Amino acid sequence: MSEVTSPTQQVIEQAPGAHLAVMKRSLQMRQFKTKSNVLHCVQNQVIVPLGQIVGVGYQAIDKEGALPDGTLKTSVLIMGDFEGTVYETGEVITAAAAYLPGYFADAIKAALTAGQPGRPVQFAIEIVAEPTGIDEKTGLPKGIPFAYGIRNLIARQAENPLEAMKRQLQKSNMLRLPPPVPLPRASRIALPARQGSAPEMPALSEAEAEGESVDDPAPETLAEGTDKRAGRKKAA
């Protein structure tokens, strides 16, 4: 006896957008974080790639908010079209707004402001978790054990204006740098941090609700039942 498919099930299977990810309210750094990748970053003090974002920004908006301690904070919200991929889970995230690491969001905002009105800014970046180092007094990970960082996946393309300028300087023997090389595929293997120096990166902002932003002023939760500072299981 053949199974009868309900009208609702038919709609689910045949809807034009059935193969597309449902758009999120906004794309945020915390969506790339899992318990295991952040725990690995902190316990092993290595840079861990979390995922990547491909986007086209059309407008930058200053969003007023406050940190958990009440301190006022302004975050930059980039409006446009964005698609993110979480390496560990394979989840695809689409959104029409994105809260990017502060320094990169400022760069996008500057490019949109300096460029021709209405001209979009395209980018492709890899999101990483970067350990903030070990506290010299305690020998444990710092209170804020990691920060979000980025790798610019298209920074060294030949058509990049910076690369064109470097080539001109090389011709004049004023700059000696290796030529642009094809970027390798994004690696899912943690890269070792430089020994003897802790990455000097602040905790980066990520917005929660509309008009609200968070700068990770407190240690990130690593895993349920895990000591945040030591990155080790608490004693029973």
Image: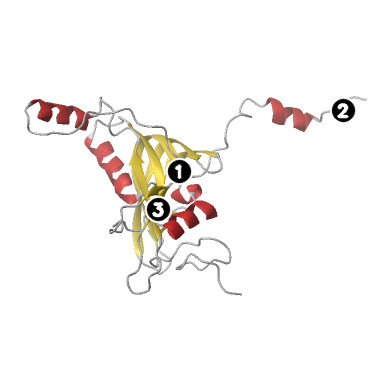
Q: In this view, does 234 lie above or below 53?
A: below
Q: What distance separates the C-alpha of mark 1 from that of mark 3?
A: 10 Å
Between 146 and 120, the one nearer to me in the picture: 146
Upstream in sequence: badge 1 or badge 3 = 3
Task: Write down the residue under mark 1.
Answer: 189
Determine the image quadrant of residue 52. top left
Visible residue check, residue 59: yes
The structure residue drawn at horizontal position 32% and vertical position 70%, both measured from the top left corner, is 136
Identify which amino acid the numbered label 2 is placed on.
Answer: Glu
Q: Where is residue 49 in the image (x, y as percent from the top left)?
A: 43, 45
Name the element at disc 2: loop
Question: Which of the two discs, 2 and 1, sits closer to the camera?
Answer: 1
Q: Where is residue 127 in the image (x, y as percent from the top left)?
A: 41, 44
Circle 1 Cα neighbour tier, 10 Å, few/some/many (<14 / 14–19 / ≥20): few
Q: Where is residue 222 in the image (x, y as percent from the top left)?
A: 51, 60
Looking at the image, is 128 positioned above or below residue 234? above
The residue beneath circle 2 is 3
Which residue position holds label 3?
A: 46
Disc 2 to disc 1, C-alpha distance: 46 Å
**Upstream in the sequence, badge 2 or badge 1?**
2
